[in-house]
Amino acid sequence: MSDGDDVKTRLLEAAKPHVPFDGWSEATYRAAVKEAGVAPGLARAVCPRGAVDLALAYHEAGDMEMIRRIEETDMSEMRFRDKVATAVRLRLEVCEDKELVRRGMTLFSLPHHALDGAQAVWRTCDRIWTALGDSSDDVNWYTKRATLSGVYGSTVLYWLGDDSEDHARTWEFLDRRIDDVMQFEKVKAQAAENRFVSGLINGPLSFLNRIKPPKGPHQTGMPGRWSGPG
């Protein structure tokens, strides 16, 4: 862990008790800087956008814990759809306080922070697919993450309002959404075998074959690359 990461971790831990009352706000950020004993200049260098960067750090920490739990969970006997559902469930279970998540969603619903929020969700879903061994190297790389992003976002919203025991209703909701994703993947596979659709993909829509996932680590947002001239 770098010195910058250590400072950010200290700021994040100091900020958490304030978030339920003040949100991921400048007031929370200032209180965290003071209580963590970090020089204001250093704090601003590590978190140029103040509480926004702390909110993103909180989400990032949750992703890292999710990956750790996925690696420790034996999924060898699970159906693939159950692996996806388990990964999403593990991601939600690492959240120690719903109010931190709720306040984060409020922050990232603001137009000037919406892209940050969308990228954070995309990275989470990329990490889930990667941890589960996804090896797609074409447009499917994007469709898998896009559909799972929709599932993840809607499940988080449901989870925030769920007061059932052990969030039982949330996991039922998640199972239904995962079934939708699996059905979508099944339809895509059937379409690929259809002569008419295959003709389109290899003809007028052949540009889809040139869409490739990003090179290197995928944790930089929603990037992509074009395979071919131009």
Image: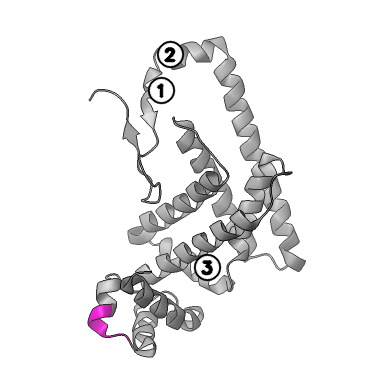
- The quadrant of the rendering that contains the C terminus is top left
- At 54% from the left and 53% from the top, the residue drawn is 153
Q: Secondary structure at mark 1?
A: helix
Give percent across and percent down for residue 64: 50, 61
What residue range appears in magenta? 38-42
| As drawn, 152 above or below 187 | below
- At 38% from the left and 45% from the top, the residue drawn is 222
- Residue beneath disc 1: 209
Q: Check if mark 2's residue and mark 3's residue have beta carbons within 8 Å.
A: no
Is residue 39 one of those drawn in magenta?
yes
- Residue beneath disc 2: 202
Q: Is residue 136 rendered to the left or right of residue 89?
A: left
- Determine which quarter of the picture holds residue 195: top right
Q: Secondary structure at mark 2?
A: loop
Give percent across and percent down for residue 193: 58, 16
| As drawn, 98 above or below 33 | above
Task: Give the CA separation, mark 1 to mark 3.
Answer: 38 Å
- Determine which quarter of the picture holds residue 178: top right
Give percent across and percent down for residue 221: 37, 50
Q: Earlier in the sequence, mark 1 or mark 3?
A: 3
Mark whose residue sits in front, 2 or 3: 2
- At 36% from the left and 25% from the top, the residue drawn is 210
